[in-house]
Image (cartoon, rainbow, N blue to C red):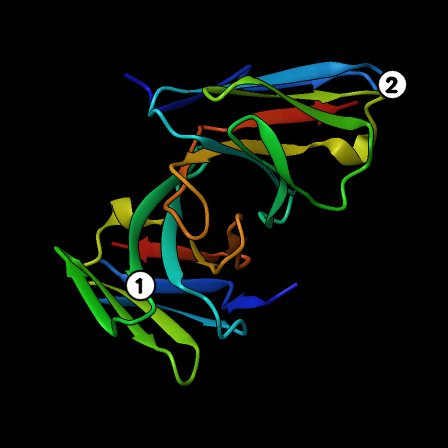
Amino acid sequence: DTAVSQTPKYLVTQMGNDKSIKCEQNLGHDTMYWYKQDSKKFLKIMFSYNNKELIINETVPNRFSPKSPDKAHLNLHINSLELGDSAVYFCASSQGLAGQTQYFGPGTRLLVL
Amino acid sequence: GEDVEQSLFLSVREGDSSVINCTYTDSSSTYLYWYKQEPGAGLQLLTYIFSNMDMKQDQRLTVLLNKKDKHLSLRIADTQTGDSAIYFCAESNSGYALNFGKGTSLLVTP
């Protein structure tokens, strides 16, 4: 009955590899987000999709590419991983835009060696 | 972007009240949120307040909003050791993403 789920929970990989993180929500929401939490716990928006359309794309390297196959899924693909990509990545969802309450997944802890 | 500021640490004794403060700069913020993050866990929505309210109470939690000063606070009554966590203040306006503070680490000592 998990509302927002992410896989994998932990990801350890070598620099230069390509990896994907998946997110699914069963809340029937139409908007999904990716946030990055750095080692100092600072959370920052990366991307937002509404009805499968990209609506926010913050200053994120183009090695990061989100994909939304349907409203319930928002995946994050990362090419040529770098040490600085090590962080916790959180997926979230909301119904609608503009200030609607966002519900977060458990996070994916990415460590790049 | 707009700033959301919080003090980084707070330590209280079990049974006391905790007050976590937050200031923000965006005067068009419509919703303000408090999220809790336990060690190694995700973000749990604790409570939120709409900008036309000045107070909201939910069991042990009381949120106070001073819109004029752009100041938000979260009071936890009868703080327990299980309340030890990082508490994030976040604001949202007409944008589509939450703007988070850096979090306040609350330590509850017996």
- The amino acid pointed to by label 1 is Phe
Image spot of residue B25 (x, y percent): 54, 74
Assign a secondary structure to mark 2. Answer: loop
Q: Image check: A71 left or right of B65?
A: right
* Image: B82 above or below B30: above
Q: Which residue is drawn at 42% across and 84% down?
A: B69
Mark 2 highlights which residue?
Answer: A16
Residue furthest toward the left?
B59
Q: Residue at x 66, y 63 (%)?
A: B1
Q: Are marks 1 and 2 on the same chain?
A: no
- The amino acid pointed to by label 2 is Gly
Q: Nearer the viewer, mark 1 or mark 2?
A: 1
Give the alpha-carbon distance from disc 1 to disc 2, as whole Å: 44 Å
Mark 1 highlights which residue?
Answer: B50
In the foreground, A34 or A40: A34
* Image: B61 above or below B21: above
Which subunit holds the residue at mark 2?
Answer: A
Q: Which residue is drawn at 38% across and 61% down?
A: B32
Instruction: Categorize mark 2 by other alpha carbons within 10 Å: few (<14), some (14-19), many (20+).
Output: some
Q: Image check: A28 left or right of A82?
A: left
